[in-house]
Image (tube, rainbow, N blue to C red):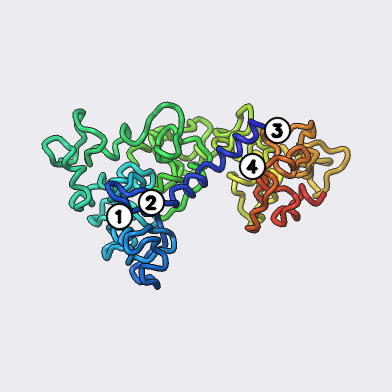
């Protein structure tokens, strides 16, 4: 029970932290508080309806910009360049990448070098933003009190010349810290959430796009990845002699599969070790295989190279949509049955979902989200979101 609970709690940590950050936050040097909110200069209230002690009060997700606590937020500033100095980077409303709280945020590591400063993506480490007023403190931290475009050994990571240097963005300790390291760091190359979520919008989003994504090709931390490809340039195909560092190969199953057990952070759901993991039974049935949540039991992933062994394991070497008594759990027809997903040993195991008999009584399996998606790690077959799932209708 304990390992299973820890596994679920760690998987939901990002959501929990986000929810906490959206709560009430103390403002530095003030008795007022602020949070990220919908805001907007044209709020419909008079400042009293959603300010707990107007006009100072608190700034929450329903507050109007007439609240004093909200006036400094980016969402309430005429030029969109406001900041709430509370040591938390909240890009959805309070801050922009130009705020001191966001100097080292993973979502603020991309620069376009087009002569225009885009505060939604570019930080004070980008040359285009060096003249911004909120970047003066970063220039002051450089030798001589001004930036010169070069990071010297004597300069700290607070200097704008150094903020986006690999040594300041990446820890290089063999562990990908999703809260502090952008996906373009070497430690994060072979993590699932950095290898597959490529937006292709021209910006390298450090929170979910790594060196496997074309948007990140210009990142200094990805130079070694490009050079590791045949000819020093990616061509879209992972060659037989190319290393897993090459962007062509990073997202290939041959580089991400083979672990002793299914690790949701580094193993795609199409890996054999994830066949029975509750993380991998969320079939979208939208015609596209999403290896972050869809495994070989999902029809969208039938053509995936790592799922071919599951196809030939069926009677006659071809699945027919029904798990027969002579087929093993390796057959794709059987993967989403509780017989194969659940151990039924009177103990809720690490990879067992709330649909398993051994897990239904666990406290984290007793609630329902009612959001249209079966969260099999926290929702059981009694929930309306899960009742139509294969493992609940057999």
Q: Residues within 10 Å of mark 4 (few under 14, many from 20)?
A: many
Residue found at x 24% / y 57%:
116
- Separation of marks 1 and 3 at Cα, in angstroms: 46 Å
Q: Secondary structure at mark 1?
A: loop
3D distance between C-alphas at marks 2 and 3: 36 Å
**SS at circle 3:** loop
Pointers 4 and 3 in contact (C-beta within 8 Å): no
In depth, the one of 219 and 274 nearer the eye is 274
**Residue that carries the numbered disc 3 in the rendered image:** 349
Q: Is residue 313 visible?
A: no
Residue at numbered disc 1: 119
Q: Residue at x 11, y 36 (%)?
A: 144
The residue labelled by disc 4 is 279
Query: Splitting the image into 4 quarters, where does residue 311 fall?
Result: top right
What x and y, as percent, mark residue 247? 45, 39
Of the residues tagged 2 and 1, which is closer to the observer? 2
């Amino acid at each position: 029970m304990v390992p299973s609970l820890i596994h679920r709690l760690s998987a939901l940590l990002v959501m929990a932290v986000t929810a906490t950050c959206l709560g009430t936050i103390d403002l530095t040097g003030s008795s007022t508080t602020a949070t990220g909110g919908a805001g907007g200069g044209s709020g419909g209230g008079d400042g009293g309806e959603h300010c707990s002690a107007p006009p100072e009060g608190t700034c929450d997700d329903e507050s109007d910009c007439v609240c004093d606590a909200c006036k400094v937020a980016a969402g309430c500033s005429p030029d969109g360049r406001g900041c709430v100095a509370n040591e938390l980077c909240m890009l959805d409303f309070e801050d922009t990448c130009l705020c001191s709280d966001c100097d080292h945020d993973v979502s603020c590591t991309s620069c376009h070098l087009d002569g225009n400063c885009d505060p939604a993506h570019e930080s004070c480490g980008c040359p285009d933003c060096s003249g911004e007023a909120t970047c003066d403190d970063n220039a002051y931290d450089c030798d001589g009190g001004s930036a010169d475009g070069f990071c010297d050994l004597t300069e700290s990571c607070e200097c704008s010349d150094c903020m986006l240097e690999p040594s300041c963005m990446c820890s290089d300790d063999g562990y990908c810290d999703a809260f502090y390291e952008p996906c373009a760091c070497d430690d994060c190359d072979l993590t699932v959430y950095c290898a597959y979520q490529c937006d292709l919008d021209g910006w390298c989003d450090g929170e979910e796009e790594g060196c496997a994504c074309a948007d990140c090709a210009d990142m200094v931390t990805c130079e070694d990845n490009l050079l590791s490809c045949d000819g020093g340039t990616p061509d879209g195909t992972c060659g037989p002699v190319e290393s897993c560092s090459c962007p062509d190969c990073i997202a290939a199953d041959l580089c991400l599969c083979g672990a002793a057990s299914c690790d949701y952070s580094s193993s795609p759901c199409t890996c054999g070790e994830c066949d029975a993991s509750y993380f991998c039974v969320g079939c979208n049935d939208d015609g596209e295989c999403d290896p972050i949540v869809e495994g070989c039991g999902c029809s969208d992933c039938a053509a995936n190279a790592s799922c071919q062994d599951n196809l030939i394991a069926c009677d006659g070497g071809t699945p027919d949509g029904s798990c027969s008594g002579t087929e093993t759990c390796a057959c794709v027809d059987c993967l989403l049955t509780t017989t194969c997903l659940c151990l039924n040993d009177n103990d809720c195991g690490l990879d067992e979902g709330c649909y398993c008999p051994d897990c239904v009584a666990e406290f984290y399996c007793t609630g329902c989200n009612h959001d249209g998606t079966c969260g099999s790690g926290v929702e059981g077959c009694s929930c309306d979101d899960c009742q139509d799932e294969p493992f609940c209708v057999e």
